[in-house]
Image (cartoon, rainbow, N blue to C red):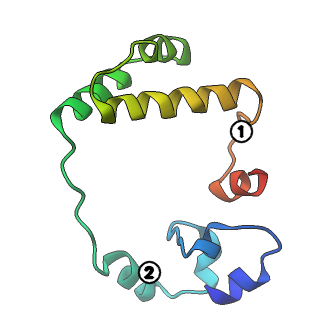
Amino acid sequence: MKEFAVGCNYKHPVHYLVLDTSGKIWKKYFMEGEFFEIKSYYNKQFRVLPVLLQTYLDSLKESNDAVSLEKKLDEEQTCPACEWVRNTLLDYFTLFKWDYLLLTNQLEGNTIRRV
């Protein structure tokens, strides 16, 4: 991991100790048994989301396109967590509208380079 990080000439998630084990680049740095160990080491269980938040997220999933999703996001939420999700998605839409986020098959590393 260190060898790859030092060799990068751009910011990569590995610089923040983020390792995506599905990345093909890592096959030349780790053996299959090491991948298994990394994936299974101290595997954290996620907490269950509050019911209001889960219900809100499920309602957003019902949108079939960006236009209908944006219409749903126009409604202010009383739950602070739901309002945070709503604002985050609206901010994302804004970045997309101003061509800051391109509609391509970019990886996370490509996006970090642009930021």
Q: Position of residue 75 (x, y in %)?
A: 40, 12
- Helix, strand or loop at label 2? It is helix
Does residue 86 lie above or below 8 as drawn? above
Left or right of 91? Residue 52 is left
Residue shown at 44% from the left, 81% from the top: 35
Cα–Cα gap, marks 2 and 1: 29 Å
Q: Is residue 3 above or below residue 53?
A: below
Residue 53 vs 110, above or below: the answer is above
What residue type is disc 1 on?
Answer: Thr
Q: How many marks?
A: 2
**Tag shown at residue 104:** 1
106, above or below 63, in the image: below
The residue labelled by disc 2 is 35
Question: How many residues crowd mark 1 within 10 Å: few (<14), some (14–19), many (20+)?
Answer: few
Q: Position of residue 57 (x, y in %)?
A: 32, 30
Give, as a three-letter code, the residue at label 2.
Phe
- Which residue occupies the foreground of this view, 5 or 84? 84
Where residue 5 sits: x, y (%)?
Answer: 69, 81
| Quarter of the figure with residue 1 | bottom right
